[in-house]
Image (spheres, rainbow, N blue to C red):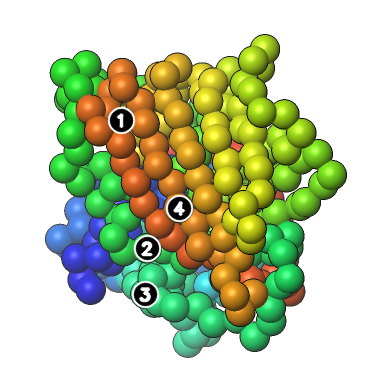
Amino acid sequence: MKKYLQLILITSTLLLLPMPSQAHHSNAIYNIEELITVEGRVTRIRWANPHVYIYLDETTASGEILNWEVEGFGPSAMRKMGFSRDSVAMGETLTVHGNPARNPQKTALFPETIVYEGIAIFDSEKYFAEMISSIKSESSANSLAGMWTGNLNPELLSVIAGTAEQDLTEFGATAKKNWDESEMNPAINCTRLPSPMTMIIPDEKRITLNQDTVIIEGVYDGMVRTVHMDIDTHENAIPSVQGHSIGRWQGASLLIDTSLFSDHTMGNFWGMPSGSQKQVTERLTLNADGKTISYHFELTDPQYLATPIVGDSTWTYDPDMEFIVDECDPVSAGIFLEH
């Protein structure tokens, strides 16, 4: 479990959690072997994707005031833990337990817990444990339409985090070796992630069934996908981050074929670019009880991948869920580069 939680923390500081659900860069700037506790008064909260930042003033025993920067997850994940934009007023006191920045010149923290008036309003380990547990739904859907919450499949963590052993082409191996987060992380420019990564992130998702299209949305980075149900070719489509998707029904399953992805610096999961030859086939199946969707994908990209990447995850029906998309703030997205 600890290994899984560490991988999730890496993943959720990538792009998340949320994600992750969710973070948008690696946690290399923090010393994950060291834990410290800081108590300070809130001076500012920057509430935006890809990360919420909380700023505290700590008064030391000698009377010195230290200005701390606390890096939270994305707004969606923060809300799931009970930390909203209005949870804490300016001047209120928070106690933060977490990992300090490796750079001794930076008073920055990656929190494990944030406590306000004796209550943990941020608990990363509890949050991620819940993400990989079996979420139960009390309601049932009669179609794929509606609100869904993605469950995090532990078997995909190493794939998402870029630590799984993948059979790469020579070109792909070179690209992975030369990948530089400070220049190639798409979150720096608020560039959204493509499928299948955006589909297996454990965020809130919404499916809308129209006569000729199926719309799939996610709150993690504001993903919007259009699946065209009235055509059977990608001819004349324009390349884009999400590619061009065509779909058909096979019983209770929606089958999706996507091509014409634009080049992406992290289109084949963490640390691996993708090219114009990338293709993704997906299957979303409403299970018999109507409480979950089974999601399956197969990713091919012969420029980078010598063999396909395949995976599965589950979405849980959550009709009462709030679907709130927070805009990406380029300033917040680039703060980690200052460390």
Residue in the image at 30% along x and 36% along y: 308
Question: Residue reaching furthest top?
Answer: 236
Toward which corner of the image does residue 298 lie, by quadrant?
top left
Q: Nearer the viewer, residue 57 or 19?
A: 19
Which element type, helix, strand or loop, lies under badge 1?
A: loop
* Residue 20 seen anywhere in this rendered image of the structure: no
Q: Nearer the viewer, residue 125 or 323?
A: 323
Relative vertical location of residue 143 with respect to residue 298 in this rendering, above or below: below
Residue in the image at 27% along x and 28% along y: 305
Q: Nearer the viewer, mark 3 or mark 2?
A: 2
Sequence order check: which comes first, mark 2 or mark 4? Answer: 2
Sequence order check: which comes first, mark 3 or mark 2? Answer: 3
Task: Using the image, tell me which numbered label, if any, was put on residue 296.
Answer: 4
Which element type, helix, strand or loop, lies under badge 4?
A: strand
Task: Using the image, tell me which numbered label, if any, was put on residue 153.
Answer: 2
Q: CA distance from mark 3 to mark 2?
A: 11 Å
Q: CA distance from mark 4 to mark 1?
A: 21 Å
What residue is shown with label 1? 272
Sequence order check: which comes first, mark 3 or mark 1? Answer: 3
Instruction: Please name the amino acid that badge 3 sits on.
Output: Ala
Instruction: Please name the amino acid that badge 4 sits on.
Output: His
Q: Nearer the viewer, residue 288 or 82?
A: 288
What residue is shown with label 3? 129
Q: Nearer the viewer, mark 3 or mark 4?
A: 4
Answer few, some or many: residues within 10 Å of disc 2's Cα (few below 14, many 20 plus, some between 14 and 19).
Answer: some
Instruction: Please name the amino acid that badge 2 sits on.
Output: Asn
Q: CA distance from mark 3 to mark 4?
A: 22 Å
Which element type, helix, strand or loop, lies under badge 2?
A: loop
